[in-house]
Image: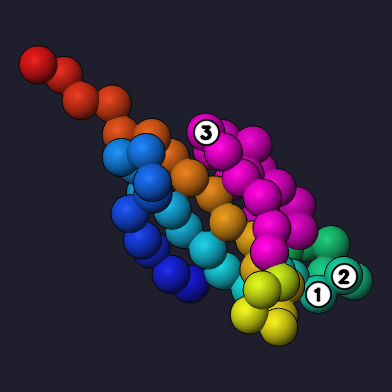
Amino acid sequence: MDLLPAQHGGDRISAPAPAASDWDRWRKAIAVLRQADEWGSSDASGAPRIWAEVDREETV
């Protein structure tokens, strides 16, 4: 799992995608993704990964 700053001032978490047959892990991953401000997937590294971004809300 990686935690990086997002382009728009939030945080981005990425992790390897669960195996297609691992329904329990997919249910848990989807529950997290549904709470994210943005999410998606990528296979640019040669292995499928899922990512989620959460915007930081700052108060003045």
Which residue is labeled 3 in the image? 37
Instruction: Count neighbours of disc 3 (C-alpha within 10 A) and say few if under 14, some if 14 to 19, many if 20 or more.
Output: few
Circles 1 and 2 in contact, beta carbons < 8 Å: yes
Instruction: Count neighbours of disc 2 (C-alpha within 10 A) and say few if under 14, some if 14 to 19, many if 20 or more.
Output: few
Quadrant hosting residue 60: top left
Instruction: Count neighbours of disc 1 (C-alpha within 10 A) and say few if under 14, some if 14 to 19, many if 20 or more.
Output: few
Structural distance between the alpha carbons of marks 1 and 3: 24 Å
Q: Which mark is residue 11?
A: none
Residue extent of the magenta highlight: 26-42
SS for tag 3? loop
- Residue 27 picture location, percent across and down: 75, 52
Q: Is residue 13 left or right of residue 42?
A: left
Which residue is labeled 2 in the image? 20
Looking at the picture, which amino acid does disc 1 mark?
Ala
Q: Is residue 11 left or right of residue 34?
A: left
Q: Nearer the viewer, mark 2 or mark 3?
A: 3
- Residue 54 picture location, percent across and down: 43, 40
- Say which of 27 and 9 sits in front: 9
Q: Residue at x 61, y 45 (%)?
A: 39
Looking at the picture, which amino acid does disc 2 mark?
Ala
Quadrant hosting residue 31: top right
- Residue 57 picture location, percent across and down: 28, 26
Structural distance between the alpha carbons of marks 2 and 3: 24 Å
Q: Which mark is residue 19?
A: 1
Q: Is residue 57 magenta?
A: no
